[in-house]
Image: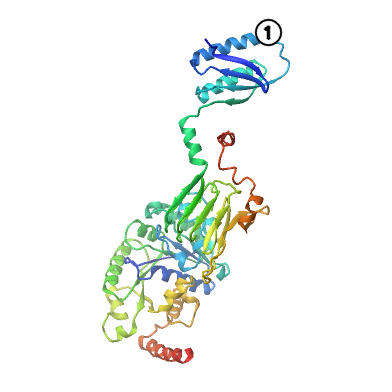
Amino acid sequence: MARTIVVTSGKGGVGKTTTSANIGTALALQDKKVCLMDMDIGLRNLDVILGLENRIIYDIVDVAEGRVKLHQALIKDKRFNDHLFLIPAAQHADKDAVSEEQMLEIVKELDPLFDFIIIDCPAGIEQGFKNAVVAADEAIIVTTPENSAIRDADRIVGLLEQNELAAPQLIINRVKPQMMLNGDIMDVEEITQHLGIPLLGIVFDDEEVTLQSNAGVPVVMNPDLPSAKGYRNIARRILGDAVPLMSLDQQEQPSLWQKIKRIFTMQ
Amino acid sequence: MQKAVTLKGTNDGWRLIVNDQSSYQEIDEALASLIENIHEESSQKSDYLLRISTGNRLIDEKQLAKMKKTIENETKFQIERVESNVLPKDVAQDFANQSGMEFVVRNVRNGQILESEKDLLLVGKVFPGGVVRSAGHIIVIGEMNGTIQAGFRGNEEAVIINNFMCDAQVRIADHVEVIEGDKESDEIKDYGVLLVNDMYVMEKISPRLLKERRPDITKETGGLEEWLERLS
């Protein structure tokens, strides 16, 4: 029996796909069997972040339309010992290519095989969103500390409340500690308060995330990075551990030292 | 006036010549009386092969099937083949679509599919997420990322030609391989030929060896007769 979690945000570009990839990877590193599902049909990315792009042969539309069996579309990530799998989205179709019934069918078939099914939702609130949400038991909402992203997150919380999902949990991504400490942008507590849903974790803004994603290696695989720590903490909280929240200034100090250390080590 | 059907013995066997000016009814009647004549003076003991020549007349498949059946049931002739000078337009169109080489100059971007029933020569770049698919061979002059699928209707003889400097997924018939190109090196590599070898494994060979490994590679592109034969 798997826990099916949809990762959604409403707004595009806040890090849904990166979050899906990293949470999935972190859970796989904790010896859980994880299936990542990319529902962003027509604009798929999850495969790129995981470095599995060229291994796609069949996709979710092939499965939905019955051209192939589900296991044929599952791509195994060889780095994780049979623990991480991906069902890629189709690239040559649009969001309507899969129906809510088909989605339920697919998730039902995956359910006994995995501990976690993580569904990467497309941006927007159209058919793609509906498909991604329909089969989920839980939802994670990703936002960044920007008003536009928070506004869209609020809209999504509202939409999710109409479905019979467990209360969605919040991840604040691209946290910029200095700006929050200076009071330039809403801080973690304000955002959580504003949205009125439990906070699952925060991830610091980190250029390494982009670099690692470009290399097809989720950042969480490199545990020294602060962003990786954020994702690992989130995964542990999903598994039920009580992990204290990373504090903003704690984060600031070592990063300053790291900078100085980097200068010395470079020479 | 010429008869609607004429049975003729030639050097290469028996030939039934259908007058292309006659109506179908005339042909039908003439055939019936011809068969009667054969019965009367029949000394036929064994099977003979028969070629039907229909000249410039188009006899549709139904009529032809009926004709064949009548002849094979009532005489000892076996139909060897049917020769005609003309083709229905749709068959000609299929021939044009499926033979020879398609020459395309464009880029194939993420989410786009370039598909061809012929051998395909693409000059342009295939981006990651783009798909190039052909029932025959594929030659890409340009960076080749994405998915390249030669012989996608099941032809294992198909080949892919490129310098294979980029990451790509290549498929020939049902065989799949992921190629990892050497992006670091600036040096331009020679073009190579990817094919499925006798061990059913994908192998990259030098273009020098192509003729040796695929002797028929240039024949496949032409020849209406061959194509029609393959069709039937």
Figure check: B27 above or below A15: above
Locate residue B118, reporting x and y percent: 51, 45
Q: Residue visible at 43% across and 89% down?
A: A258
Q: Is residue B54 left or right of residue A96?
A: right
Q: Residue visible at 59% across and 34% down?
A: B229
Q: Secondary structure at mark 1?
A: loop
How many numbered circles does the render carry?
Answer: 1
Q: Going by the picture, which residue comes out furthest to the right?
A: B45
Q: Is residue A264 left or right of residue A142?
A: right
Q: Going by the picture, which residue comes out furthest to the top?
A: B40
Question: Dot 1 falls on which chain?
Answer: B
Locate residue A104, reporting x and y percent: 43, 55
The quadrant in which residue A180 appears is bottom left
Locate residue A197, reporting x and y percent: 32, 73
What residue is shown with label 1?
Answer: B41
Please state which of residues A193 and A94 is positioned toward the viewer in this rendering. A94
The quadrant in which residue B35 appears is top right
Amino acid under disc 1: Glu
Please state which of residues B216 and A112 is positioned toward the viewer in this rendering. B216
Q: Is residue A239 visible?
A: no
Colour setting: rainbow
Circle 1 crowding by C-alpha within 10 Å: few under 14, some 14–19, many from 20: few
Please state which of residues A97 and A171 is positioned toward the viewer in this rendering. A97
Figure check: A79 above or below A128: below
Figure check: B124 above or below A217: above
Q: Is residue A154 visible?
A: yes
Q: Residue visible at 56% across and 40% down?
A: B222
Please state which of residues B164 and B179 is positioned toward the viewer in this rendering. B164
Figure check: B45 above or below B90: above
Locate residue B92, reporting x and y percent: 48, 34
